[in-house]
Amino acid sequence: MTRRKTPPRKLHSGHFAFMRALAQGLDERASWDRYLGLEGEHADLRQVRRTSAWIRDQFAAAARREHRPGTARLILLDPDRFASAPAIPSLAEFAEARGMEDFSEAEQLEAYEEAYPSAGTGGQGAPAATSRRGRVIERQLEALRWLQGLVAQDPKPGDGVAAWLNPSLSARLERAGIPTLVALVERINAIGARWWVDVPGVGELKALRILDWLHANEEVLGLQVGVHAETPRAQLSQVDLAAVVPAATAIRPYEKFILPAELNGNAGRYRAPREKCRLMAADDREAVGAWLASKKAGVEDGTLSSTQRAYRKEAERLLLWAILERKKALSSLSEEDTTAFRSFLSAPPATWCGPRHRQRWSPLWRPLEGPLGTVALRQSLIILRSLFGYWVSQGYVVGNPFAAVALPPGPQRPLGSSRTLTFAQWDHIDALLQGHCDSQVDRRLRRSMHWLYATGLRLAEITAARCEDLERVDYRTGDGAMATGWLLLVTGKGGRNRQVPVPGELVEELGDELARHGFERQVGAMSNRGTHVLARFDSGVKQPASWSASALYQALKAFMAEASKGLPESDTEQLMKFSTHWLRHSHASHALQGRGVQRPVPLQVVQNNLGHVSIGTTSMYLITERDERTKAMQAFWKTKI
């Protein structure tokens, strides 16, 4: 295997400044921190000595290339090898020491020159003496000035990081997919202040040194690190983030995509007569907005619901593809176009794809992660069929180009059968949760997993749940005795409300957490109104915010990755694919199966917990019923065939 040749490092003005400081006897550590801090800690003396030797060698090599071997030798000299000349007293000091204060100046000079024959005198009668060490330093400084003008370079955006940064540091950046300086600045701007987290071996201190170097060379590079990339994410407003990437007719999120006037759909080929349209929309963007609004508003502050975000994602992909790839307005798409779009989703170009966790403000955001699987492709086409169906019903277009597009086959296996925890896996996870460190963050993680598993709520539903949504109720047990339970009011898809039973133990645990942070222990107390079930009590504000859906998702993914260690290989591989939705699947499957003395939960109860409109959807979780049918028929076949 041929190893890639590493480009040689380049000399910059900092190298020369550092060597000038050393030549003049300035403090080595202070000079290192000032000019070469990017190379590493000054306390690492081996690194300091190694870098200093490399700089001297590079200087000498440059001098030899210019056919100046004397300068090359001079650069390598250590001035400390040469002793300074003995100190010579001034004329006044000499006269005082000899008791000649009352003599004339001419007599003093005569005696002085007799005592110090090698000393000359300056214009003011002061002696001037130059040591060999001083002459070496002076000549070295002169040589450094000449060399700097000859070989010092300014960094360029396309230069490799290995040309300018410490070799070990540049190697880590290259392994993380950051080969050049422009790629480095783009990565920092795209991720923000904690960009270094995804670069193994680069911590906060090294990241700050890199930023300092980039700032020092900002003008010559022509690359600028954005203010947002040096500010913690929590301190940035939506306005700050929105300014990172300008709106354009390019791969941009829906809200930043500029429709060209000729393709905005105002004169779409399949637009219905204006007098028959019941939408106020002037173009396709506004018509998409009307469709999204018809899916119900999200929260009171106007943010989109999870359903609206899912629908926007599919409309966004189609809009970008239609304009950028097909050069058509949405209202001009034909059946042939929609068939081509289906093929596009099955094999999108790499430039359209990126990791899911890149946020919409980031330059690294992309509309797709990669080719859509069968289930995701089917869902996408169904949603887009719904979009055009809405437009047809409102008289915006005359037909639905997605109506005749063949849908991929629906799932044949029970819902979530490949994304459900076994009882043994859940027991393992629950044991780890019980032994989790007792910090506020760890308790919140434990609480979130227990709530999701016990209730079957969606991610958006659990992060939106507040204390006032919990209601204490009295009910009769199977033997007729009275008992107390809890119900959680949940607003699910389509704005439909339902009440989901919650274990009393989880409510008590929430009360303990509230009391721990100075809130009323009674969950239903008026003072607890507005406090989320998964509140971030570490946020340092009077009314703590809820744990965001994205942060909860990432935290549970990280925990499950750790939980998978030490398990059999098949379990490890499965748990590495875990997402929060698995807990919803597991709730439904485990409840419908029953376990030991626990009887299966009635199908209608699980349907309510999950918020399914159709009981047929919930029945797809009946894995046990399927297995029992198969087992019974196997026994029958053995006796009859």
Image (cartoon, rainbow, N blue to C red):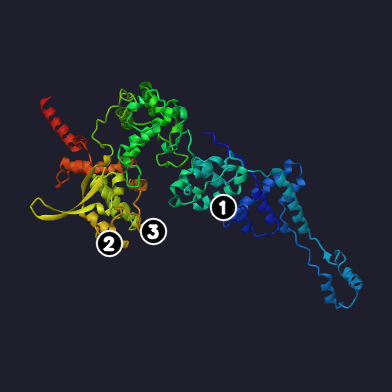
Spatial CA distance of label 2 from label 3 is 17 Å
According to the picture, the residue beneath numbered tag 2 turns out to be 520
How packed mark 1 is, by other alpha carbons closer than 10 Å (few <14, some 14-19, many 20 or more), is some
Count of numbered tags: 3
The C terminus: image quadrant: top left
| Quarter where residue 541 is shown | bottom left
Q: Measured from the top left, where is residue 26 in percent x and y?
A: 67, 59
In primary-sequence order, the first of circles 2 and 1 is: 1
Residue at the spot 24% in from the left edge and 55% down from the top edge: 507
Q: Nearer the viewer, mark 1 or mark 3?
A: 3
Out of 58 and 386, give the one closest to the viewer. Answer: 386
Question: Helix, strand or loop at disc 3?
Answer: loop
Q: Measured from the top left, where is residue 111 in percent x and y?
A: 89, 72
Residue 113 image label: none
In primary-sequence order, the first of circles 2 and 3 is: 2
593 over 412 or under it: above or below:
below
Spatial CA distance of label 1 from label 3 is 35 Å
- Badge 2 amino acid: Glu
Q: Measured from the top left, where is residue 460 in percent x and y?
A: 31, 45
Q: Measured from the top left, where is residue 384 in percent x and y?
A: 33, 30
Residue at the spot 82% in from the left edge and 69% down from the top edge: 90
| Quarter where residue 407 is shown | top left
Spatial CA distance of label 2 from label 1 is 51 Å
Left or right: residue 320 versus residue 275 is: right
- Badge 1 amino acid: Gly
Residue 40 image label: 1
- Badge 3 amino acid: Gly
Question: Helix, strand or loop at disc 2?
Answer: loop
According to the picture, the residue beneath numbered tag 3 turns out to be 540
Please say if the residues under marks 2 and 1 sit with CB atoms less than 8 Å apart.
Answer: no
